Each structure stands twice: as structure tokens, then as C-alpha cells.
Amino acid sequence: MIGLTTITTLIAKYGLAIVAPIAVVEGPIVTVIAAWLASQGILGLWSVSLIVIAADIVGDFILYAMGRWGLNRLPAGLMARLGLTRARLEGLGSHFAERGGRSLLIGKVTHSMGFAVLAAAGMARMPAVPFFWYNLLGTIPKSLLFVALGYGFGSAYATIDSWLSRFSLFMGAAIIGLAAVYLLRRFARS
């Protein structure tokens, strides 16, 4: 991860040209910093909003593409070690055919498991158009929330970054805990 001070300096110096590539990787905190700089008159607020939404979509499509065209090309032995059997991949395909939109939106909200949901959508071969629309539906409010947070409170970006990290860690632990409870109950019934 690039340091927050470095990100702030780069964005202040190079403007929107640097926001897009950094936002693909470090989306939320870059959005907060760029919006804060917009509140200082250094960047345009609407431009920041559009750039961070586009960058988030690009980053999500990269993860989707890795799942769709990258992970499926792993050697069969490694796929089996990862638990990615043909039956599980077919089940994943069924899940995303029936509830893919909901899964993508939950992945957006939880933030910590979003990468896994996006890659899983690709592995499940979720059609690109529904993937795009559901993803856009989740991206716009999330990005605008971070823009508003940055515009209003962006000078505290280091504290906001800390809170984002804690929230992601908490959500990741909660999801893992819920998955463990689900699996324990499922195996107990068998």
C-alpha cells in the first residue's frame, strides 16, 4: 500500500490523472482524499465523483476477469486443493444465475469480501451485462458516500483509513464466523 501522505501529495500534484489508477487499487481512501482536495478547490467535485466510480468499476471488472479467465486456467490439481471441483463450480454458477445480483451488492457493502465475490462471479461465468448493472448499482452509492465523507471530513483521512480497516476486518471476521456456523449446522444435519 502506498502511504497516505504520498497519495495526498501525488493527487494534489497530478490531479485526476493520478486519481484513476490509484483508485483502482486503493478505492475508498483515495476517494476520501480526492474529495477532501475537491473541498479545498484543488480538484472538481463532479470530476472526482465520476473518476472514482469509473475506477471502482474497472477494478471490479479486473477481479471478475481474473475469476472468469484466470482462475479457471489453474492446473486441475491446484483447483482441487483449493476446493474448486467441477461440482462446486457448477453450484457456483447456479448461485450466480439465481442470486448473483444480491451477492454482488452484499459484496459491495461488506467491502472486505468484495474481491472474493467479484472473482466468484467471474468463475461462475455470470454474464457481463448483469454483472455490470448490479455492480454499478452498488458502486454509485458506495462511492458517493465516500465522496461525501471526504468532502466533509477528509482532513481526518488517516483516522478514516483506520476506521475503514477496522470495519473491513470486523466484516471479514463476521462473514467467516457466519460461514463457520452455517457449515457446522449443515454437517451436523448430515
Image: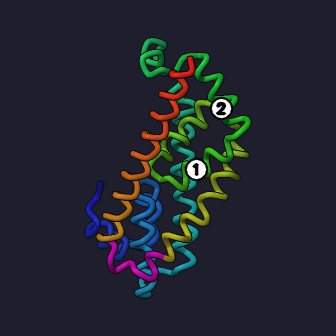
Mark 1 vs mark 2: give the one in front.
Answer: 1
Name the quarter where the C terminus is drawn.
top right
- Could you tell which of marks 1 and 2 lies nearer the N-terminus? 1
Q: Residue 102: horizontal and vertical position, in percent? A: 66, 47
Count of numbered circles in the view: 2
The extreme front residue here reads 189
Q: Residue 140: horizontal and vertical position, in percent? A: 61, 64
Label 2 Cα crowd, 10 Å radius (few <14 / some 14-19 / many 20+):
many
Magenta residue span: 149-157
Vertical position of residue 30 compared to residue 95: above or below: below
**Of the residues shown, which amino acid type is indicated by label 2?**
Arg
The extreme bottom residue here reads 41
Vertical position of residue 4 compared to residue 75: above or below: below
Vertical position of residue 126 compared to residue 27: above or below: above
**Of the residues shown, which amino acid type is indicated by label 1?**
Ile
Give the residue number, with chain letter if any, for mark 2: 125
Q: Residue at x 59, y 35 (%)?
A: 122
Indicate which disc residue 7 carries.
Answer: none
Q: Residue 107: say if magenta.
A: no
Give the residue number, with chain letter if any, for mark 1: 106
Vertical position of residue 138 compared to residue 155: above or below: above
Magenta part, dominant SS: helix
Q: Residue at x 50, y 53 (%)?
A: 110
Q: Nearer the viewer, residue 160 or 170?
A: 170
Spatial CA span between label 1 and label 2: 18 Å
Q: Residue 78: horizontal and vertical position, in percent? A: 42, 17
The reply to whether the C-beta atoms of the residues labelled 1 and 2 are less than 8 Å apart is no
Quadrant for residue 50, please give it.
bottom right
Q: Residue at x 47, y 35 (%)?
A: 181
Residue 123 as seen in the image, left or right of residue 80: right
Q: Residue at x 44, y 66 (%)?
A: 19
User: Element at badge 1?
Assistant: helix
